Amino acid sequence: MSTAPGLGRTHGACRALAAFAALSASLALLVLTGCAVNPVTGKRELSLVSADQEVQIGRDGYAATLAEYGQYDDAKLQAYVDSVGKKLARVSELPNLDWHFTVLDDPVVNAFAMPGGYIYITRGILAHLNSEAQLAGVLGHEIGHVTARHSAKHITQQQLAGLGLGLAGAFSETFARYSGAAEQALGLLMLKYSRDDESQSDALGIKYAVAAGYDPREIPATYAMLKRIGERGGSSLPFYLSTHPDPGDREARTTALAEAAVGTRTGLLVQQKPYMDRLRGVVFGEDPRGGYFDGARFYQPGMGFELLFPEGWAKQNSHSSLVAQEPSKAAFAQVTLAPNAGTLSPLEYVAALKRDGRIASASGSVETVGGWPAWVGHVVVPPANGATSGTVLFAAFVRQSPERLIQFLGQSKAIGDANDLKLVALARSLRPLQDARRANPVPDRVVVGQAPSAGVFNVMIGRLGPMAISLDDAAILNGRELDERVITGDWLKSVAPGKKL
């Protein structure tokens, strides 16, 4: 069994600590609690994160991850992915860990692991895979990050360097302090694995796939797909590659690993038909039912409102928030639901923020926005980390319904400057969504079928009906070339267009 470079050096650190343990009681305690056996390598290594702490980090991060990305609403697909994941986990070095495999309602091509057995895979990458064996390869790779304790290693390295674990978030620490977004586990998503970690997880993913009965020769095609998406996007990498650095020619390297792992084995499973059957109707791309932009205007069908953002600002919609940024980064805006608002009026909520110490002061007034009661003004967030003064934020709160208080936060260089006025205008643009066409959008969905006859891919794919994606994107989706020959009965995927109006 191969080990990643660096593990041996960490093992040496344990020996060095032990040699000096007699000099310090606290250091002796570090040796007792800070050296653990890596399940994959069987070696002792320095770790400031225990196995129980890993489970706690993963558990704490679960709710935060679902709030950020959302769980995909398809119980059968969730159960299917979970069954494949559990099959792989049973043949790993940690078969008794309480593993969790979750499909996220996110269009990006991504999969990631959190400590303690929490594995996430997006509907975006599921749409681009073409067999259960490929799915096993992706899940097995992420399982490898957990069994090899890669996150624990990164946390340890950061703590030893005195850096601590960063928090995930689109804005400054001020926003995190204000909103109470202390979801430490989400900070792990900001960490990039090393190339050594990636190489080790590639090998482990293939090992687990074979042990679970899958044909690992399907796995290299996944990396070919990721490379094509990156090339198609120019300088923009798939999110998977941004957090999983390529340790080299991954397709060639995993091909060699897969061939070696198969050896003389026969009967290994690909399982294309069961996988394709589960993909039918999966939402593809952004789901407009969760909100969508048309130019600078944002429509939120589920909550029944619309907003007008400043022209030219970069904008992003997620399950938990709307964020926007002025082109030169001179101003920011964030729209969320106010936390712990209960049924408080906007004015009462501002008073509660001050009483709880989340703001030091507030200056604003009660008004009506979009026919709803609101408070619009500015608040001062108390100073932290040695700062001598607090931070001024634009803030607005709109009671849209008895259970929903919409919160606007923003920051510009000064109260009353041009960008501050744009933040005020953004909050005051909130109004009910009354256009029935806008209120009932239909998402694009994956269509699956078999080629009725032999032909060229770029012709045969059209037999599945109108497409919401280009021919080039359809080729990537299927792992095909445009001029590749398709034979009768070959499985093909397309994307049927939905509608926003």
Image (spheres, helix red, strand yellow):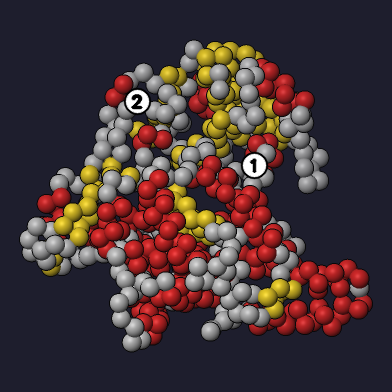
Residue 181 is labelled as 1
Tell me what residue is drawn at x 42 percent, y 71 percent.
Answer: 212
Q: Is residue 13 above or below residue 430?
A: below
Find disc 2 in the rendering and name its residue.
439
Q: Secondary structure at mark 2?
A: helix
Q: Are marks 1 and 2 in contact (CB under 8 Å)?
A: no
Q: Nearer the viewer, residue 37 or 423?
A: 37
Residue 94 shows in the view: yes
Q: Residues within 10 Å of mark 1 (few under 14, many from 20)?
A: some
Residue 298 image point, x, y percent: 41, 30
Position above or below: 137 against 119 = below
Query: In 3D space, how far apart are the residues under numbered discs 1 and 2 (Cα atoms)?
Result: 31 Å
Q: Is residue 424 left or right of residue 461?
A: right
Q: Is residue 477 visible?
A: no
Q: Amino acid at mark 2?
A: Ala
> Where is residue 325 drawn, in percent x and y?
51, 40
Closer to us: 140 or 179:
140
Residue shown at the point (47%, 22%) measured from the top left = 430
